[in-house]
Amino acid sequence: MRAFVSLVLLALAGCSNAGSQTLLVIAEVIASGDSTNVEVSVQLRDSPVIGANVVVKEAETEKTTTLESRSPGIYRSIIAGYARELELSITSGDDDLNAELEGPAPHQITRPPNDAIVRRGDFSVLRVEWAAEEDADLVEVEARGAAAFAVSGNEYEAEVPLASLTDGDQTISVTRERAVDLEGGIAGSRMRTRYKVDNRFTLEP
């Protein structure tokens, strides 16, 4: 097994990463099968850090991407496809942080299938099911018109009350995530990867 995988396992256990322990870093990764959006907030003593060098590296391809900043302390980039294993490096003068995280395994929504017709009939709930190769830390389920709710990362099904959904075109979203506290930063520093899948369906009486 590659050394990187071992380090990732440590990251998931909260025992990874390195840094000067001076920066507050919040790294949010939102992904789908088509793209990976990376946003990193960097602060030093409650002030946004301007001009930091913020880089992510894809473990599989070893491709590096330097994030751009258009707002003070906020660094962003979009990577094609799902960059599941990312290494994050931040440098600003004598302050630095290095972290890595393997995101959740890609998943598919198996029920309701995409473009399905769902009839209410005598049912009071919509049963949602998904499949993935590995558990996640947390799963969020959301249907249009209904409040999002979370279930455990080792769950692969949930029920959405049909009373909250309107007939016609509908969308069901399942987002699975993994996260790690960043020990190389100050308390509250965190990195999280969320992988989201949407299925369309038509709800009929």
Image (spheres, rainbow, N blue to C red):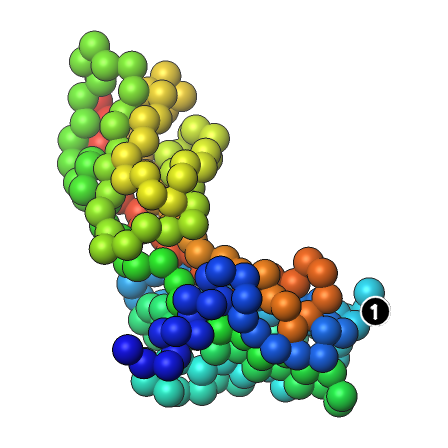
Q: Residue at x 38, y 45 (%)?
A: 153
Percent of width and height locating residue 199: 26, 44
The quadrant in which residue 116 appears is: top left
Q: Residue at x 23, y 14 (%)?
A: 123
State the SS at label 1: loop
In this orientation, which residue lies closer to the viewer: 63 or 23? 23
Kind of residue at badge 1: Arg
Q: Quadrant of the N terminus?
A: bottom left
Q: In the figure, 39 relative to 165: above or below?
A: below
Q: In the figure, 23 relative to 141: above or below?
A: below
Percent of width and height locating residue 155: 32, 39
Residue sitting farthest toward the top: 122
Q: Which residue is mark 1?
A: 45
Q: Quadrant of the C terminus?
A: top left
Percent of width and height locating residue 100: 49, 73
Percent of width and height locating residue 143: 37, 34
Q: In the figure, 187 relative to 128: above or below?
A: below
Q: Residue at x 72, y 79 (%)?
A: 20
In this orientation, which residue lies closer to the viewer: 170 or 153? 153
**Neighbour tally class for label 1: few under 14, some 14-19, many 20 plus, Cα within 10 Å:** few
